[in-house]
Image (cartoon, rainbow, N blue to C red):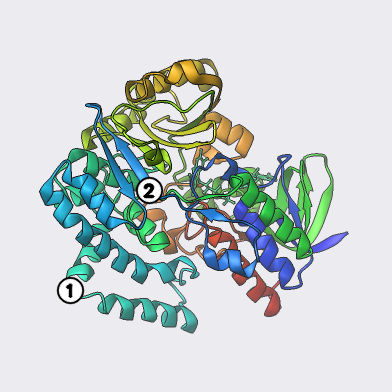
Amino acid sequence: MSYDVIIVGAGHNGLVAACYLAKSGLKTLVLERREIVGGGAELDHATGPFSQQIATDLNLKIEFITPKVRVLALSDDGRSLCIYNHDVHSTVKEIEKFSAKDAKIYPQFVESFSRIGSVLAPLLSMTPPSIDHPAKGDVWQLGKVGLAFRKLGKKDEYRLLRWGPMAVADLVSEWFETELLRATVAARGIHGAFAGPWSAGTSLGLLWQAALDGSAIGPSTSVKGGMAALAKALGDAATSAGAEIRNTAEVARIEDGKVTLRNGETIEARAVVSNADPRTTFLKLIDPVELDPNFLSKLRNYRALGTVAKIDLTLSDMPEFRGVDDSAKLSGRIHIGPEIDYLERAFDASKYGEFSREPYLDIAIRANLMSIHVQFAPYKLRSGDWDSRAEEFANVVIDRLSVYAPNLRDLIVAAQVITPLDLEQEFGLSGGHIHHGEQTLDQFFTFRPLIGWAQYRTPLKRLYLCGAGTHPGGGLTGLSGANAAREIAKDFKAGKV
Ligand SMILES: Cc1cc2nc3c(=O)[nH]c(=O)nc-3n(C[C@H](O)[C@H](O)[C@H](O)COP(=O)(O)OP(=O)(O)OC[C@H]3O[C@@H](n4cnc5c(N)ncnc54)[C@H](O)[C@@H]3O)c2cc1C
């Protein structure tokens, strides 16, 4: 049997692409190596946020939950700072506990990022223009962004131009004097990255977050029923649109218009779309002789060394956090990384192949599950390996967390540690990189994954990419899948495949 489209991987982007392509009438097959669909989504504790437009287009049966709290930041001295979603007034009152000056400027910070975010937002659902041969439509789209940019006013225009390449530590210190606030805001710039707050270009993460949902600070929106509910809704939407999904179907080889499964079965299609990350796709699934050596060498330089590990704790009760007077403040994310220097030192360890002894932690507690995102945990350890050091690592994290929640250890019923090696072996993420590759200026927009190949097409005429290694990158947004599907459908319509 042959198909119009085979999608390799049922991550959320693969499923979004499957929905749109099947809806456009193409006979679509999704092949997923794992037993369940959703890919990395099951590890997430907040959506990117997921695109509302896609949820509407696909009529997804899900409910997003945005708690009152965006993030609660804890400090070693037992104080805490709560940043609310959409409630600047309450946040200002929290900041006043630390600095009247910061409290006064915070509303301006929020408004500036909101205005800049709304100018950048249209870029997210756009195909990055070709540098060599920009199409008329691309120029028109960029022109519209340019016009919106001109309407920002001089102050925000200059800010936008200056901030992108800046170290996020510099950006936050231009706004605020409180270390806890600086570090909490700066964290978005290093989330999932091989970078510390003093690394150049880390402000980009804040601008991108603002484009996604109007705020520079990491989001706390989740899905009723957990991320598994989102994965299920996407899987159901794909099958109702006519797509076929096969689990435990690992693709071992991709050729132009053909895939071969691990069990030797071959399946043909007019186009193959890879939801796997760029390094996995081109360095593992394709015979190198099929690719231009220049392209291959650029791809080998595509940076995707992960620095994140995940620990899930099942708890018998809600832990008590020092200095937190109201448990409702625990409804968003919890940030541990009280100073810029703390975050930088946490990164330093990973540069030298060690996990941080005092890691940056991003936590969410849902029912009796504590989901802990840990940085920095480098994919390559200088001494020992992840299999032999996972327990030691978990103890470091739990010890650190116990400084803030002293009764935590007594409440742990079960613990699951997911190391960067597990992310590679179980979730198929090359180098264990949570975003399918670093999201730095040189691997962004028209450069994602590589300059000349940012339009979801690849050097193999009938092979496309649709995962987080393409624009607009990582995070549970569905946008890479939707953008890729639009380009693929265009090529089918034009008779190019
Ligand atoms: C630990 C962790 C925490 C994260 N936290 C958050 C968060 O809180 N919020 C957020 O927005 N984002 C978060 N992310 C990022 C987010 O999960 C990713 O950006 C997102 O999963 C990317 O989706 P995707 O569909 O592009 O790829 P993936 O989810 O990686 O899906 C790719 C799919 O392809 C499959 N595949 C790979 N190779 C093959 C093959 N050869 N044959 C068949 N199938 C194959 C994989 O099994 C997988 O199902 C986190 C990621 C991780 C790893």
The answer to which quarter of the image holds residue 42 is top right
The answer to which quarter of the image holds residue 359 is top left
Q: Quadrant of the C terminus?
A: bottom right
Residue 402: x %, y % from top left: 37, 21
Q: Quadrant of the N terminus?
A: bottom right
**Is 20 placed above or below 239 here?**
below
- Give the amino acid at mark 1: Lys
- Element assignment for label 1: helix
Q: Earlier in the sequence, mark 2 or mark 1?
A: 2
Tag 2 residue: 70
Q: Identify which residue, 94 or 158, lies in the foreground.
A: 94
Q: Is residue 222 visible?
A: yes
**Is 439 placed above or below 240 here?**
above
Q: Identify which residue, 381 or 225, lies in the foreground.
A: 225
**Disc 1 residue lies near ligand 1 with CB under 8 A:** no
Distance between the Cα atoms at labels 2 and 1? 30 Å
Q: In the shown orientation, is residue 360 left or right of residue 272?
A: left
- Give the amino acid at mark 2: Arg
Tag 1 residue: 154
**Is 381 placed above or below 16 here?**
above
